[in-house]
Image (cartoon, helix red, strand yellow):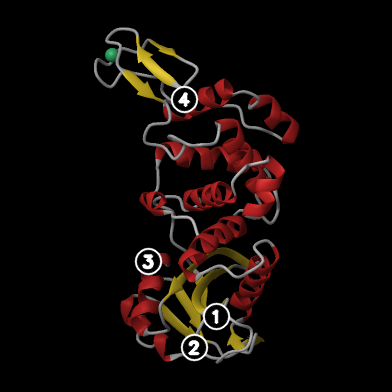
Amino acid sequence: MRIPKNQIDFEKMFTTEEQCIEYLKELRFPAGFSCRKCIHDEYWLNKRGIMVCKYCRDELSITAGTIFHRSKLPLVVIFRALWWMVAQKNGVSAIGLQRVLGIGSYRTAWTWLHKFRRLMVFPGRDRLIGTVEVDETLVGGKASGKRGRGAEGKSMVIIAIEKTEKGTGRVRMSLIPDGSKKSIGKFITDNIELGSTLITDGWKGYTGISKKGYTHTIDKKTKILDGEEILPNVHRIASLLKRWLLGTHQNYIGEQYLWYYLDEYTFRYNRRKSKSRGLLFQRLIEQGVMHVPVEYKSIKCM
Ligand SMILES: [Zn+2]
């Protein structure tokens, strides 16, 4: 399949609604179309993206069961929105997107960005492995407030990052309700392969983690960020994350939406060395066609 190489290429590939429909069709039926009723493979495709089986006349909408179904926005606008989000180094805010694409409603722009964020978690992705640094930090809320684990008005985010010979590898992060053994343990087993070596600070939430099948090393070389002591590699990610939330998204995002932003940040960080924006674009469109995340249905606008 052709992948957009740059902005000009993108514009050429997706000038019309028909081109977008054709692209979705190719992603949806990579091995070619076959009718779900009679298995014949010949069809007509109309301008509204309906495939009609030439044999039994069964109709199938290309977008049915995908995130693109029954959208108020034309596909050319949705494709541009995703391209813009992927092509910009730091992503884009809903207001920014609204302006660039002339989308009439802020809510629509906001909702689409959230739909895209849900696509950024690929099903069955590999867990982190090797030596992994894990620590928590507080995000959002008022600048002044109680410090330490569990301050009010702030959300606790746990971050895990692979330590490699050359520096750091992939990252995972998640919102957790508290710094308890239970919350921390669940994040670790969900996101880190058994047998890995965990580097943490001396917090009691990490005690006993070696019983779950990890090698546990306690490191006391923490750095200070917003009054918190954080391990050095997590410190770097946490400060980049906070700067990104403040810069691109002007802070403050309610806690109920924060995890979408964590997904986007994780996606960006883990693909920071990827040269092809076009490939990322295609992977995300493909996600939207083939694996609609269940949660997307529950995205409600602020
Ligand atoms: Zn048929």
Res. 180 image quadrant: bottom left
User: What's the mark number on residue 190?
Assistant: 3
User: Is residue 92 visible from the viewing direction of this image?
Assistant: no
Depth check, front residue: 145 or 290: 145
Depth check, front residue: 183 or 113: 113
Tag 2: amino acid: Arg
Q: Which residue is mark 2?
A: 149
Residue at the farthest left position: 37
Q: Is residue 113 above or below residue 172?
A: above
Task: Verify CB contact (< 8 Å) between mark 1 and mark 2.
Answer: yes
Which of discs 1 and 3 lies nearer the camera? The answer is 1
Q: Quadrant of ligand 1?
A: top left
Q: Tell me the CA gap for discs 1 and 3.
A: 21 Å
Q: Is residue 205 above or below residue 213?
A: below
Q: Earlier in the sequence, mark 3 or mark 4?
A: 4
Q: Tell me the CA gap for discs 2 and 3.
A: 22 Å
The residue located at (58%, 90%) in the rendering is: 145
Tag 4: amino acid: Lys
Q: Please provide percent x and percent y for residue 32.
A: 41, 20
Q: Judging from the image, what secondary structure is the residue with disc 2 in?
A: loop
Q: Please provide percent x and percent y for residue 86.
A: 64, 47
> Is the distance from the Cβ of mark 2 to the nearest ligand 1 atom less than 8 Å?
no
Quick check: 56 left or right of 135?
Answer: left
Q: Which residue is mark 1?
A: 138
